[in-house]
C-alpha cells in the first residue's frame, strides 16, 4: 500500500498497524520540535540514539536537518595531555562573556579502552555544567572510525538545532581520526606543548595541512619559543599561493587562563578570512559530502547485515572458497539484488 504523508495518509490508511506507525512518527517529530525549542533532555535523548545508531534516531535526523547550519564549528585537536580540555573550558568561559551559547563535544576514541580521559575532560569542564548556555557531551564510540565520524557529525547537527552559536569539538589521537574530524570543523585548532616532540609525527600525518590555528600550550614550562620557531620554519616550507590563510600561532598557559582571548580572536580572524574568500561555503559543502557518504555507507552496511542473517552471504563465501566466483562478481550480484530490494522497500513506505 502506498501511503503518502499528511491528511491523505490519514484518509486512506486506517488499518491499526498504520495508525501505530503514524503515532510513532508524531513522537519523532515532537523530539525535533522540542530540540528547536531548546529542550536539553530531548537533545540528550537523540544524541544517545545516534551513539547507539538506532533507526529511530537516524530517522529523526531527517526532521532536524533542515533546521541546522547556523552554528560555527571549531575542532580542537592534539596529543593526549596537551591541554585541549583546559583550553576548551577557557574558551567556553570567554564565549559566554560575549553572550554566545556554546556546545562542546569531547570525542575520545581511546576511552572505550582506557575509560579515563573523558572523566578528566568532565572534571575540567564541570565549572560550566550548571550554565544553561552551555551543553557538553562526551562521545565514546567503539573504536570504529566511521561510526565516530558519523556520530560526531550528527551531534554537531543536534547542538546546532538546539541553538548553540559555537560548537567546540575536542578530539584526541593522531592520524586518520583527527583528519576526519577536521573535515567536520569550520576552523581547526591544533594544540601542541613544548617537549612532546609531536611536530614530526604531525607532519607525517598531514596535520600541518589540516591546522588553521596552532596553539602552543604550557608556555609556562619553557621551550615554547623554540617550538614556535620550529613550527614557523615548517610552515614556511609549505608552498603557499597569495591570499591563502597563514595559520597563526598562539602561545597559551591554559591552567592560568592565559592566551584565551588571543586564541578566540584568532578563531574569529579565521572565520572572517573564510567568509571573505568564499571558503566557508566550500568547507561546509565538503562536510555535507562527508555526511552523505557516511550515511550512505551505513545504510548499505545495515542492508548487508540484514541479509546476512540468512545464509545469503554464506553461499557466496562457499562459492568463493570453491573458486566458483570472485569477490567483484559476487558484489555485482549482491548489489543488483540490493537495487531491487530497495525499490520495493521505498515503495512500501
Ligand atoms: N603546566 C601547565 N599544565 C597545564 C596547562 N594546561 C593544562 N595543563 C595540565 O595538563 C594536564 C592535561 O590537561 P588536559 O586539558 O586534560 O589535556 P587534554 O588531554 O589535551 O585534554 C592537566 O593536568 C592540566 O592541568 C598549562 O598551560 N601549563
Ligand atoms: Mg581532554
Image (spheres, grey):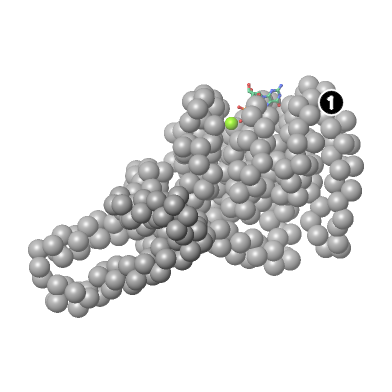
The residue that appears at 59% across and 39% down in the rendered structure is 171
Secondary structure under the numbered disc 1 in the rendered image: loop
Q: Is residue 261 visible?
A: no
Q: Which quadrant would residue 339 be assigned to in this image?
A: bottom left
Q: Find residue 335 and report its horizontal and vertical position in percent.
A: 42, 65
Q: Which quadrant would residue 178 be assigned to in this image?
A: top right
Q: Quadrant of ligand 2?
A: top right
Q: Find residue 286 and report its horizontal and vertical position in percent.
A: 61, 61
The answer to whether residue 320 is left or right of residue 169 is left
Q: Find residue 104 and report its horizontal and vertical position in percent.
A: 52, 41
Q: Is residue 326 visible?
A: yes
The residue that appears at 63% across and 44% down in the rendered structure is 176
The residue to which callout 1 is attached is 223
Q: From the image, which quarter does the C terminus lie in?
A: bottom left
- In the image as oriented, which residue stretches furthest toward the top? 221
Q: Find residue 241 and report its horizontal and vertical position in percent.
A: 86, 62
Of residues 93 and 81, the one drawn nearer to the viewer in this rendering: 81
Of residues 31 and 14, the one drawn nearer to the viewer in this rendering: 14
Number of numbered discs overlaid on the protein picture: 1
Amino acid at each position: 500500500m502506498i501511503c503518502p504523508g499528511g491528511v491523505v495518509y490519514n484518509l486512506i490508511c486506517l488499518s491499526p498497524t498504520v495508525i501505530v506507525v503514524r503515532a510513532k512518527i508524531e513522537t519523532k517529530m515532537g523530539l525535533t520540535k522540542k530540540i528547536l525549542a531548546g529542550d536539553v533532555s530531548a537533545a540528550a535523548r537523540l544524541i544517545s540514539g545516534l551513539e547507539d545508531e538506532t533507526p529511530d534516531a537516524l530517522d529523526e535526523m531527517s526532521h532536524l536537518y533542515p533546521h541546522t547550519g547556523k552554528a560555527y564549528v571549531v575542532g580542537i585537536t592534539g596529543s593526549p595531555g596537551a591541554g585541549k580540555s583546559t583550553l576548551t573550558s577557557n574558551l567556553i568561559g570567554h564565549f559566554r562573556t560575549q553572550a554566545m551559547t556554546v556546545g562542546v563535544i569531547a570525542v575520545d576514541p581511546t576511552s572505550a579502552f582506557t575509560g579515563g580521559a573523558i572523566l578528566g575532560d568532565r572534571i575540567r569542564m564541570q565549572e560550566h555544567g550548571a550554565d544553561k548556555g552551555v551543553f557538553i557531551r562526551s562521545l565514546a564510540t567503539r573504536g570504529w572510525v566511521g561510526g565516530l565520524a558519523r556520530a560526531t557529525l550528527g551531534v554537531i547537527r543536534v547542538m546546532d538545532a538546539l541553538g548553540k552559536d559555537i560548537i567546540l569539538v575536542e578530539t584526541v589521537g593522531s592520524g586518520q581520526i583527527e583528519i576526519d574530524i577536521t573535515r567536520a570543523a569550520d576552523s581547526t585548532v591544533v594544540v601542541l606543548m613544548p617537549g612532546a616532540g609531536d611536530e614530526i609525527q604531525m607532519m607525517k600525518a598531514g596535520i600541518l595541512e589540516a591546522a588553521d590555528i596552532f596553539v602552543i600550550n604550557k608556555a609556562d614550562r619553557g621551550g615554547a619559543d623554540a617550538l614556535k620557531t620550529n613550527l614557523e620554519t615548517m610552515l614556511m616550507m609549505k608552498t603557499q599561493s597569495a591570499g591563502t590563510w597563514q595559520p597563526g600561532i598562539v602561545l597559551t598557559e591554559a591552567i592560568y587562563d592565559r592566551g584565551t582571548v588571543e586564541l578566540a580572536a584568532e578563531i574569529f580572524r579565521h572565520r572572517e578570512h573564510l567568509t571573505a574568500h568564499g571558503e566557508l561555503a566550500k568547507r561546509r559543502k565538503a562536510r555535507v559530502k562527508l555526511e552523505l557518504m557516511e550515511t550512505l555507507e551505513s545504510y548499505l552496511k545495515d542492508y548487508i547485515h540484514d541479509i546476512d542473517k540468512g545464509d545469503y552471504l554464506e553461499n557466496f563465501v562457499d562459492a568463493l572458497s570453491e573458486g566458483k566466483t570472485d569477490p567483484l562478481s559476487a558484489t555485482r550480484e549482491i548489489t543488483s539484488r540490493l537495487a531491487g530490494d530497495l525499490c520495493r522497500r521505498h515503495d512500501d513506505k
